[in-house]
Amino acid sequence: QVQLVESGGGLVQPGESLRLSCVASGSIFSIVAMGWYRQAPGKQRELVAAITSGGTNYVDSVKGRFTLSRDNAKNMMYLQMNSLKPEDTGVYYCVATAGPEDNYWGQGTQVTVSS
């Protein structure tokens, strides 16, 4: 019912910035929350940031550096990533949920932070 497409990943050096974008289509009226996951090589998938009607939340490791925002008029969600570190490297996934067992995932976009 919901399709998500991420973009904006790439290769950057430590300390640089990157902005990820996610566009949603389909039955977007059903979405109650959205967020960003990431998965680094050899590590578990981690919820980085999420946004609901109650506000935004971030994993401790990105607080103060990452900002999640949403433009409902454009069906877009963004993740502004500043002061990037090598530990931020991974595949970032846009995710939306319409309720329990009703989750939608994008295809992922690669973020590599390396000198």
Image (cartoon, grey):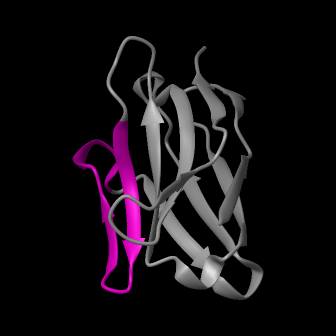
**9 relative to 65, above or below:** above
- Specify whether residue 50 is painted magenta: yes
Viewer-side residue, 46 vs 107: 107
Side (left or right) of 81 relative to 27:
left
From the viewer's side, name the closer residue of 2 and 115.
Answer: 2
Q: Is residue 66 left or right of residue 114?
A: left
x then y, percent, for residue 62:
35, 47
Residue 45 visible within the image: yes
The residue positioned 27% from the left and 50% from the top of the image is 59
Q: In what quadrant of the picture does the C terminus appear?
A: top right
Which sits in the foreground, 80 or 41? 41
> For residue 77, what is the image quadrant?
bottom right
- Residue 1 point in image, percent of width and height: 65, 66
Secondary structure of the magenta portion, mostly? Answer: strand
Residue occupying the far left of the picture = 60
Q: Residue at x 54, y 81 (%)?
A: 30
Query: Residue 9: x and y, percent?
Result: 70, 37
Residue 95 position (above or below residue 44): below
Horizontal and vertical percent position of residue 4: 68, 56
Judge from the rendering whether residue 26 lies leftward or rightward of residue 30; answer left or right. right
From the viewer's perspective, is residue 115 above or below residue 18? above
Q: Which residues are magenta?
A: 46-63
- Residue at image position (45%, 72%) is 98
Q: Is residue 15 visible?
A: no
